[in-house]
Image: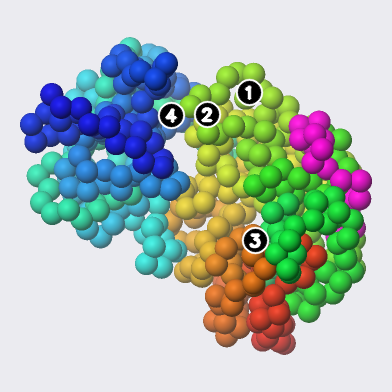
Amino acid sequence: MKIFIKLNLLTLYLIFSFGSEQVIAIGLPKKNNHFSLDELRSSIQLKDDKSTFLYCTEASTVKGELKIVGGNNMECKGNFELAWDINVPSNGTYELYLIANVRKEGENTDILFKTTGGDMNFKLKPTKGPYLGGRNFQRLELTSEISLTKGQQIVSFSTKGISGDHILLDFRSIELVPISAKKRIEKENLRALNSRESVDWLVKSGYGLMFHWTSESVQQDGTIKSYEEAVNEFDVTKFADMVEDTGAGYVIFTIGHAESYCPAPIKSWEKVHPGQTTQRDLIAELADALKRKGVELICYINGPLGFNLDVKKETLTDNEQQSFVNNFQDILKEMGSRYKQQIAGYWFDSWYQIFEKFPEVPFEQFNKATKIGNQNRIICLNSWIYPSVTPWQDYWAGEVASPIDIPVNGYMQNGPAPELPYQALLIMEPYWVQQKSEMPNPRLSSQKLSKYILDCMNNGGAVTVNLGIYQDGTVGEKALEVMKEVKSIVRK
């Protein structure tokens, strides 16, 4: 047996060569710079009251030509096998789902799902969705019932007899839903659906703007002032006038991002992030200045950073999970009570990462906390290109960067989140945060953007455009001209 070590930016692989076959163990635990073969396989405890997800990054054994890419999904080529060591709490039946983007090359590929109870064969069909020429991840039902016996066992997901080296699918996870919990799950889904706030005002506004104004934003000369100094110098009136010139109906403004700075004296935020709040309440001033222009304010908060959950850790302790819950309760309660109608909504980032590490997140409790002070406040939990992590939200976060297929009656057709009201988030520049002195040319023309906005408005969806913004609160002149032209076309 030959052992090779391969190191890339995402993970560490040990490749054991048995003749012509390679077996790749992913994410090996490290102990005193040595690896224990007993540690190659970590058991995943199945839940009997909710779904259990078997992620590609948690596979105990991987065979074949596979590649983990950004966002923790796996490009699968040719013949491969993924296996997980699971622990089943009791004899039971489960629904089986595949979370993946199946490419055209993967059509009619035979998939074998194997358990100790037997083998099941499925044929893949290409997934569908709004990403034009891109990846459309979906939650695909493979079978309505499989039987699993109590105790520890290995389940696997594999192909065979494949010729060629095309990527067949982009694999995210397997989902196992216990049949015994179906009624409870359906009741919660219905409760979540009935709790949703109306997004009519968002749809009627048609389009809005997002600004990643952060501690990493630069001045026009490329320098950076301290965050508090930048907050103190921010010209709210000038900013609101600029927004009015674009015709935007709402603004999504960052509260923390890569670094967790909050432009307001929020005591609970200061407790979690010492030294990262300000005396000036820029949130309140922005909300009031925009409201005078008929523009609503939505606040962006990065979930893991804002509420302090280290999603890069292999596992989280009970104390770390409870601390996260306490933090979001305290921060959202204080912000909700302080701002009331001033904050019309939240856009929460990085929730697929949170859910992967902490699947027991009390989503209903989180949802209730976001509504404190304003029951009509609308929220979304960003799951990027993946299916939504919870029904406890009011609209789709829609981080798409470029225009996608328009909605039908306010919802996307197929794709990752057909159950959530449609809102697509685009970027005018090639990146979210302006970290260079030179502002790049706009990616979108006024004609193309206007047509997309009008098409979405006519079909019940909203469009948000992220504009590059300097630390002094100004935006690029070329992008501003595009948005002024959009206003003249859309608001005529």
Res. 320 mark: 1
Q: Is residue 306 visible?
A: yes
Q: Nearer the viewer, residue 282 or 34?
A: 34
Q: Nearer the viewer, residue 407 or 337?
A: 337
Residue named by callout 3? 435
- Secondary structure beneath label 4: strand
Measured along the vertical axis of the image, is residue 328 above or below residue 291?
A: above
Asked whether the residues under the numbered discs 1 and 2 touch, taking CB atoms below 8 Å apart as contact, a structural biologist would say yes
Q: Earlier in the sequence, mark 1 or mark 4?
A: 4
Res. 460 mark: none
Q: Earlier in the sequence, mark 3 or mark 2?
A: 2
Residue 202 belongs to magenta span:
no
Q: CA distance from mark 1 to mark 4?
A: 21 Å
Task: Name the residue type under label 2.
Answer: Lys
Residue named by callout 4? 52
- Secondary structure beneath label 2: loop
Q: CA distance from mark 3 to mark 2?
A: 28 Å
Q: Earlier in the sequence, mark 1 or mark 2?
A: 2
Residue named by callout 2? 313
From the viewer's perspective, is the residue at label 1 or at label 2 nearer? Answer: 2
Q: CA distance from mark 1 to mark 2?
A: 11 Å
Residue shown at 38% from the left, 58% from the top: 135
Residue shown at 59% from the left, 70% from the top: 429
Asked whether the residues under the numbered discs 4 and 2 touch, taking CB atoms below 8 Å apart as contact, a structural biologist would say no
Q: Nearer the viewer, residue 35 or 397?
A: 35
Q: CA distance from mark 4 to mark 2?
A: 19 Å
How is colour applied across the structure in the image? rainbow
